[in-house]
Amino acid sequence: MEKVKKEELNLLSMEVILHAGNARDFVFKAIEQAANGDFAEADSLMERANEEIHQAHREQTSTLQKEAEGIEIPYSPLFGHAQDTLMTVKTEFNLIREFIKLYKKSSER
């Protein structure tokens, strides 16, 4: 049975963490901009965050597809951490997107 090397899985895990971390930075900068009334910049930062999330998700999915193809994926706490980081950032993205909507409504009053 073919098996993913630990080094390859570590690199994939770090890619997920890198892109998820970039997304987190953009998301928190976006809400700061929304709080200051700069909604165009907030929207731009949220789009950049979304792109980073999609890239992280692609990296994660490529790994999971290997397992579906019968390639053994060794247990990795680092990969588990990467998945957890991505899931958390996706939740933060969704919540902050709603907060930005609230800031926009509040500014219209």
Image (tube, rainbow, N blue to C red):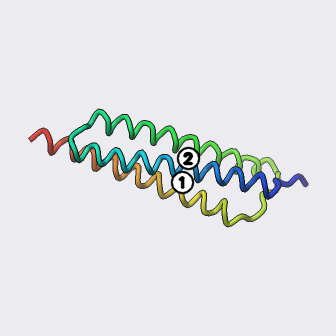
Q: Which residue is situated farthest in the left direction here?
A: 109
Residue 48 lies left or right of residue 68; in this view the side is left
Say what secondary structure mark 1 lies in: helix
Write the residue at 21% across / 46% down.
103
Of badges 2 and 1, nearer the viewer stands 2
Q: Whole-percent x and y of residue 5?
A: 82, 55
Q: Crowdedness of circle 2 by 10 Å Cα count: few (<14), some, many (20+)?
A: many
Mark 2 or mark 1, earlier in chain: 2
Q: Whole-percent x and y of residue 91?
A: 43, 55
Amino acid carrying label 2: it is His
Question: Label 2 to label 1, Cα distance in Å?
Answer: 8 Å
Q: Whole-percent x and y of residue 49?
A: 45, 42
Circle 1 residue? 86
Image height of 17 relative to 58, above or below = below
Q: Which residue is situated farthest in the right direction here?
A: 1
Q: How many marks?
A: 2
Amino acid carrying label 1: it is Leu
Pick whichever, 86 or 31, lies toward us: 31
Pick whichever, 18 or 5, lies toward us: 18
Kindly identify which numbered label has been placed on residue 19. 2
Write the residue at 22% across / 44% down.
36
Pick whichever, 64 or 18, lies toward us: 18
Say what secondary structure mark 2 lies in: helix
Q: Crowdedness of circle 1 by 10 Å Cα count: few (<14), some, many (20+)?
A: many
Which corner quadrant of the image does residue 83 belong to? bottom right
Circles 2, 1 touching at the beta carbon (< 8 Å) = no
Q: Whole-percent x and y of residue 53?
A: 52, 44
Kindly identify which numbered label has been placed on residue 60. none
Write the residue at 79% across / 47% down.
69
The quarter of the picture where the N terminus appears is bottom right
